[in-house]
Amino acid sequence: MDIFDVNWLAVVLAALAGFVVGGLWYGPVMGKRWMAAVGVTEEQIREGNMVKTYGFTFLLSLLASWTLAHVFATYPDLAFSVMVLTAFGVALGFVVPALWTNYLFQGAKRSLFLIDGGYWLLFYTAMGLVHAAFA
């Protein structure tokens, strides 16, 4: 299989889906709780370079989506539900443990782990839904 042999429309739309999930999760759903857990204010966030932050975030979402597309391309006959559960499993089995390990060593608040861990589960599930819809 060629590294470019993926459905690029699905890759981009899945990355966008994850990006939208992040906007909702860290905005109206968990934004204030996340800021409290991190110890920042809205003003401090606005002072950052948001174009750079969102630009790199989207590029990283594309990388995650492209990688997930390759996992699915390896097994082209997966059922819709299996693809969604696989994406969820990537987050649950790889991302969440890595995040938790970092937070344990950093002494981060449990609430931060729950907020960020929940986000990554939703992020990968959203991407899995999009990839499964295009399979």
Image (cartoon, rainbow, N blue to C red):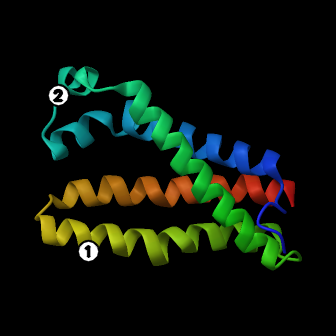
Write down the residue under mark 1.
Answer: 101
Q: How far across and down, in percent of the image, does residue 31 sit?
A: 32, 35
Observer-nearest of 62 and 94:
62
Residue found at x 81% / y 45%:
9
User: To which quarter of the image does residue 48 belong?
Assistant: top left
List x then y, in percent, for residue 39. 12, 40
Name the residue that disc number 2 marks: 41
Residue drawn 45% across and 33% down? 54
Q: Label 1: state its secondary structure.
A: helix
As drawn, 87 above or below 8: below
Residue type pointed to by label 1: Thr
* Left or right of 104 on screen, residue 119: right
Q: x, y (%) of residue 104?
A: 17, 71
Q: Earlier in the sequence, mark 1 or mark 2?
A: 2
User: Could you tell me the amino acid type at mark 2?
Assistant: Thr
> Quadrant location of residue 27?
top left
Looking at the picture, does residue 61 appear above or below residue 35?
below
Q: Position of residue 74 (x, y in %)?
A: 79, 78
